[in-house]
Image (spheres, grey):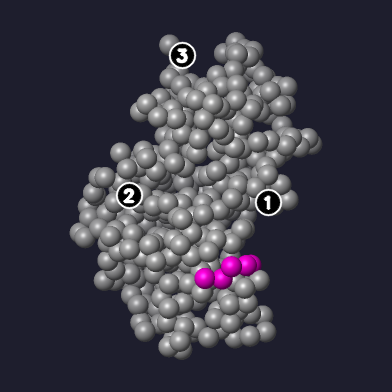
Amino acid sequence: EDRRYRFLTYVFGGGVKVREHEKPFDAVTPIRVASVRGQLRFWWRACNPGRCRTVEELRQREGEIWGTMSQASKVEAAVLSQPSAPRNVEVFAYELKNGKKILVVQKGMREIAYGAFPLQPSREAQRSGAQPWVLYDYGSSIFTLRFTYPKELRADVEAALWAWETFGGLGGRTRRGFGAILREGASGISAAEAGLSKYRENPHIAGAPSLHQARFATGSKPHSSALEAWKDCLGLLQMMRQGRGFGRNDPPAGSRKPAGRSRWPEPDEIRNLTGKTAPAHKNPVVTVPRFPRAAFGMPIVFHFHPGSPAEPGSMGDPDMKPLQLQPVGFDRLASPLIVRPLADGKSFRAAALVLSSEVPASELHAGKKVHPVNTTLDATLARQIPALNRNGRTYTDPIDLFLEELKR
């Protein structure tokens, strides 16, 4: 069968070459079969249509359908037509302020910039004038894929295709909505909810992200543009984690800073663990010894403002490198939260899917020292975290808070 697609959002990378965090555009094969197959394998595991109960069963069944190093896949995929060349989208650019070149977010890109932060060169590279990378806008350009498979695998292949087309995409950072795709003739949000109901009760396998008891929510506001619906998702994430009056306090009176101190416990707990605190921050805002934002995925790299001699007491916060939260024994934990726009008739809505997964034991890497940390909360601790108390309710899971705010 042949299926036609277009991109709803800007694509992050998509080529076969990678230079550090740059993913240059591939003019020959922007849509690659290997990338599509990787997405389908992931979403097939998440659906678990064969109702496998162990990792071993899942691995064996995956190999039988999608292939192994020694066995060809029973599902053939081919790119029949590529999309036309994309337009470069600048998210960050240099501007001259007070005689100094600084990197700023382009107009209308505030929310997208939050999700596209890896496009920025490192601070050291910025000082040497390194240019930020760009996103790719394919507009309404269509690409066509052909899938060929035995009839007995129809249920497996259709499960993978449905999940990828509904919640996935191509390129980098698809869990934050980049490269989201839309299949021509696809149904709307009610079809997404109906599809989820088919796989929510399939067995959960520890360590394998899945649709088992997956949580799903959509925004209440319809948009004529998929990009605007996508901005709802990313903007809410930014507000939760860093926004004034939500993730951060209001700035002190007379301050020119956009926001005050964090209403989450991680910054003050890092100061406590490392023993480094600027005099102006010696009184903690939150005294809960937890790192709850690990629920959004790891690693989390922390940056404290170095302070300035012009601001008495602002210097002395943690400055060691690395300074990041990561799972014990692993480099990263992919976020279970997937955000993107979903078509709903002629309009689009912000949508979020939360895969079933576990947050493993975590640790803070601070320079040469490693500190074991706790990421879980109970109601008593959550009540002491201002960011987790909204609209008369206390949330012990930051992702539950995100879903409720998205609905609002």
On whether residue 34 falls in the magenta region, the answer is no
Give yes or no for residue 52 being in the magenta stretch. Answer: yes
Q: Which residue is mark 2?
A: 218
Residue type for callout 1: Asp
Identify the residue at image location x=42%, y=82%: 154
Q: What residue do we see at 73% from left, 22% from top? A: 275
Residue drawn 30% across the image and 64% down it: 191
Residue 67 x %, y %? 59, 81
Q: Is 352 left or right of 171, judged from the image as shown?
A: left
Q: Nearer the viewer, mark 1 or mark 2?
A: 2
Residue occupying the point 60% across, 34% down: 291
Name the residue beneath numbered marker 1: 331
Q: Which residues are magenta?
A: 51-55
Q: Secondary structure at mark 3?
A: loop
The residue carrying pointer 1 sits among few (fewer than 14), some (14 to 19) or many (20 or more) residues within 10 Å by Cα, namely few
Q: Which residue is more in the foreground, 327 or 310?
A: 327
Q: Earlier in the sequence, mark 2 or mark 3?
A: 2
Indicate which disc residue 252 carries: 3
Q: Is residue 344 left or right of residue 378?
A: left
Q: Give the Cα separation between the discs numbered 3 and 1.
A: 38 Å
Give the percent coordinates (x, y) of residue 263.
Answer: 50, 25
